[in-house]
Image (cartoon, rainbow, N blue to C red):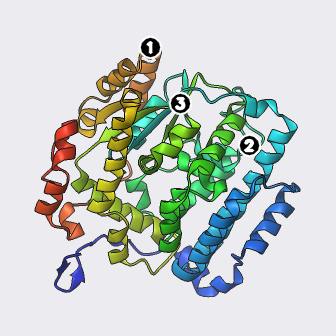
């Protein structure tokens, strides 16, 4: 990475820690918080009263992840507390889902038919597109509170007033209490549609884990892992969630799907992919700042140079090349393309083209709900997320050349002012 005056060019810096975070970190010792496998499994068993974790495919990645937390994440006291709470929650949900599926075998006999997956490089409009698609009454997105507490699954009548929503809201919003700038980067809330890699967390094969911590050894393991068990767990969780509240179709979202489309199609052969496209140069700058902020929730020792190493031009190129390979191997008809520029200029028109591509009915009610959602969500209501490619220190001309073929293929305009 190029340096400026012997300092990393990446310049995003968080504001001061809230007083309660500083106080807890001063009086608490991270070593008090056990993150060993035995302690976490025992706590999950105690919390649920269940005994069966299901197949053993989660064991190796759990151990790799916990080892990376200990050696690499440099968690402060609050961060280590959050990491333990996450791991126990994922293990407990695994126990509850396995138990429910044994009690009600019909759950796993019901297919998750022809789901829509929104994917693309991060920061390319996937979130707002996902949220808008979820406004269609025929479609359903998993909400943050449902993913945190999927058992017992909600029914259609009570899902809007479930008692689990309020505690989930406090837990989800805690990130913004620890790092207030996070609100300007990515909206969090219990009722918000969530990236569906969160559904994979109980398999311990998920970018949800790598995205929350600086854990390069786990990220390296995950990059080479068989992701089919993760997607199988993903499908099983959707089967649970749809048991008493079945949508016509699920609409799901995560940039991470770009890396594992083969595994996705192995589990969901009739999936339809909505692929968002944006100039990768501002993407890299935006991702660097949000990755730093996410890790900063749990650690005071996040290295800006390491952040830039997590998501480089090579990373973007690899993800895009994988998507193009899968499309060219016979899946092109299962993809619809959405340009970020089109989504910003006229989101309803961009979405109408997706419906047309997949021969789905775009009803007047769906359109009206989407327009109402946009009107109630003005851009920048939590402040501006400021980033620029110059902050990365990467060479603009080299990165322009790297992505020239991709931009020509999909007609992606450059954002040279970013």
Q: How far separated are the C-alphas under marks 3 and 2? A: 28 Å
- For disc 1, the marked residue is 363
Q: Secondary structure at mark 2?
A: loop
Residue 323 vs residue 352, the one in the foreground: 323
First in sequence, mark 3 or 2: give its number.
Answer: 3
Identify which residue, 94 or 350, lies in the foreground.
Answer: 94
Q: Which residue is mark 2?
A: 163
On screen, 238 above or below 7?
above
Position of residue 128 in the picture relative to residue 412 (left or right): right
Q: Percent x, y for residue 47?
A: 83, 60
Left or right of residue 388, residue 108 in this image: right
Can residue 232 be seen? yes
Observer-nearest of 377 and 8 = 8
Q: In the displayed structure, does residue 412 sit left or right of residue 35?
A: left
Mark 1 vs mark 3: in front: 3
Residue ID at (22%, 68%): 391
- Dot 1 falls on a residue whose secondary structure is loop
């Amino acid at each position: 990475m190029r340096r400026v005056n012997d300092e990393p060019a990446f310049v995003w810096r968080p504001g001061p820690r809230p007083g309660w975070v500083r106080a807890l970190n001063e009086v608490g010792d991270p070593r008090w918080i056990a993150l060993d496998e035995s302690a976490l499994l025992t706590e999950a068993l105690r919390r649920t009263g269940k005994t069966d974790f299901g197949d053993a495919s989660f064991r190796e990645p759990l151990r790799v992840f916990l080892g990376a937390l200990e050696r690499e994440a440099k968690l402060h006291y609050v961060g280590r507390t959050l990491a333990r709470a996450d791991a126990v929650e994922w293990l407990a949900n695994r126990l509850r889902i396995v138990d429910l599926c044994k009690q009600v075998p019909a759950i796993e006999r019901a297919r998750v038919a022809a789901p829509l997956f929104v994917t693309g490089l991060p920061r390319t409009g996937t979130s707002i597109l996902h949220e808008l698609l979820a406004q269609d009454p025929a479609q359903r997105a998993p909400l943050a509170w449902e993913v945190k507490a999927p058992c017992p699954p909600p029914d259609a009548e009570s899902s809007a007033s479930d008692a689990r929503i309020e505690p989930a809201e406090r837990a989800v919003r805690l990130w913004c209490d620890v790092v207030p700038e996070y609100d300007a980067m990515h909206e969090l809330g219990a009722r918000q549609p969530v990236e569906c890699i969160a559904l994979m967390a109980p398999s311990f094969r998920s970018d949800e884990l790598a995205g929350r911590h600086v854990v390069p050894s786990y990220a390296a393991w995950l990059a080479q892992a068989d992701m089919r068990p993760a997607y199988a767990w993903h499908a099983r969780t959707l089967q649970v969630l749809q048991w008493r509240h079945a949508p016509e179709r699920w609409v799901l979202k995560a940039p991470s799907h770009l890396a594992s489309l083969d595994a996705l199609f192995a589990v969901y052969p009739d999936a339809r992919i909505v692929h968002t496209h944006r100039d990768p140069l501002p993407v890299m700058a935006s991702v660097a700042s949000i990755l730093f902020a996410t890790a900063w929730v749990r650690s005071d020792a996040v290295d800006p140079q390491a952040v830039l190493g997590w998501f480089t031009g090579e990373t973007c190129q690899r993800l895009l090349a994988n998507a193009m390979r899968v499309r060219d191997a016979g899946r092109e008809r299962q993809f619809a393309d959405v340009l970020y520029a089109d989504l910003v200029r006229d989101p309803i028109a961009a979405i109408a083209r997706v419906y047309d591509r997949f021969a789905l009915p775009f009803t007047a009610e769906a359109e009206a709900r989407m327009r109402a959602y946009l009107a109630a969500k003005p851009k920048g209501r939590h402040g501006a997320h400021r980033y620029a490619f110059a902050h990365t220190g990467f060479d603009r001309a080299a990165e322009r050349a790297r992505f020239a073929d991709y931009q020509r293929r999909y007609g992606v305009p450059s954002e040279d002012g970013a």
